[in-house]
Image (cartoon, coloured by chain):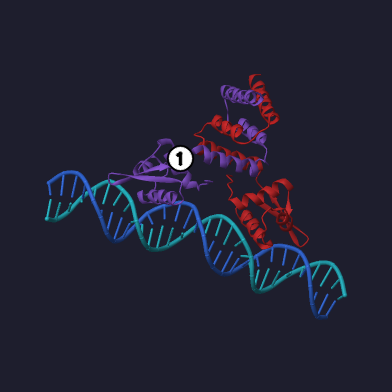
Chain colours: A purple, B red, C cyan, D blue
Amino acid sequence: MKPTFTDRELDVMGELWTLGSATVAEVQERLPAKLAYTTVLTVLRTLEQKGYVGHAEEGRAHRYKPLVKREAAGARALRRMVDKLFQGSPELLLTQLVSERGLSAAELRRLRRLLDERLRGRKS
Amino acid sequence: MKPTFTDRELDVMGELWTLGSATVAEVQERLPAKLAYTTVLTVLRTLEQKGYVGHAEEGRAHRYKPLVKREAAGARALRRMVDKLFQGSPELLLTQLVSERGLSAAELRRLRRLLDERLRGRKS
DNA sequence: TCTCTACTACTAGTGTTGTAGTAGATGGTA
DNA sequence: TACCATCTACTACAACACTAGTAGTAGAGA
């Protein structure tokens, strides 16, 4: 499975990922953009057709649930971005990440610790 | 300016960024995908219309040049990705980056050095 | 039972993307 | 000069994205 999403699909998936599962109405009211109920429904149905979400009956409504994990989508998007926008170099991406966003010292330290752990794991 | 690119546009921009500037023919022959000359031209014209590239006459041909920097596009895409796919957490993104791709120990060390430098610069 | 309401299913219109063909211009060459 | 190669400009068209409306259904309340 190789999920890639359009902008709007990603908005909707985002809500599903954070909520775990949701009805049309729930997604609609949480979306920043003011969209018609039926519009949200359509997006969800598209996602379902593509196999990225599933649904179960819940009373009269449907409760939608993501079938792909956030991590899978993230990994894929990340790979693509490193290739196309950072010349295949994760370092360039990280540079961008730490320089552009105002990351706090604490965050930077956490990132470094993460790398340390990874390095230790690698050596053993 | 807030540049976001479609897949194909990104391919073409990628070549422009690496080459600095290029004619239609140059982009075409460097693209992995086998596209008709006119197809590449069309993409470039679209990009120009959107204001992302400019061109200057060069003999009979046009020489196209990116008007937005790779870093700007990268930064924007990265921000969007962190927000939508990594819940606004750069750490999650980095976790993904180091776990998913087969990064070498050398790369990991370089990444850590980068963070070190950043931390030192921050403290002073 | 009748009506209101909250749903889903279906349909549609407009815009964008991706690909490429045809026409027309221009410069080199036999 | 006549032809060929190389360009750009314009046009086309299918697929998809985005938005939303209309129709139909079924539970809830008078």
Q: Quadrant of the C terminus of chain B?
A: top right
- For residue A58, what is the image quadrant? top left
- For residue B100, what is the image quadrant? top right
Name the residue furthest front: A124
Where does the image place residue D6, in percent across and percent down from the top left?
A: 76, 64
Q: Quadrant of the N terminus of chain B?
A: top right
Tag 1: Cα neighbours inside 10 Å, few (<14), some, or many (≥20)? many
Where does the image place residue B89, in percent across and percent down from the top left?
A: 52, 31
Please report, as a chain letter, where disc 1 is located. Answer: A
Vertical order, A45 against B35 (above or below): above
Q: Nearer the viewer, residue B48 or B115?
A: B115
Where does the image place residue B122, in percent across and percent down from the top left?
A: 64, 22
Where does the image place residue A105, in percent across and percent down from the top left?
A: 59, 22
Q: Which residue is drawn at the image coordinates 48% and 39% (left, top)?
A: A69
Q: Which residue is drawn at the image coordinates 54% and 36% (left, top)?
A: B82
Label 1, on which residue? Answer: A14
Q: Which residue is drawn at the image coordinates 45% and 40% (left, top)?
A: A14
Callout 1: helix, strand or loop? helix
Q: Which residue is drawn at the image coordinates 63% and 31% (left, top)?
A: A99
Q: Nearer the viewer, residue C3 or B113?
A: B113
Name the residue furthest top: B124
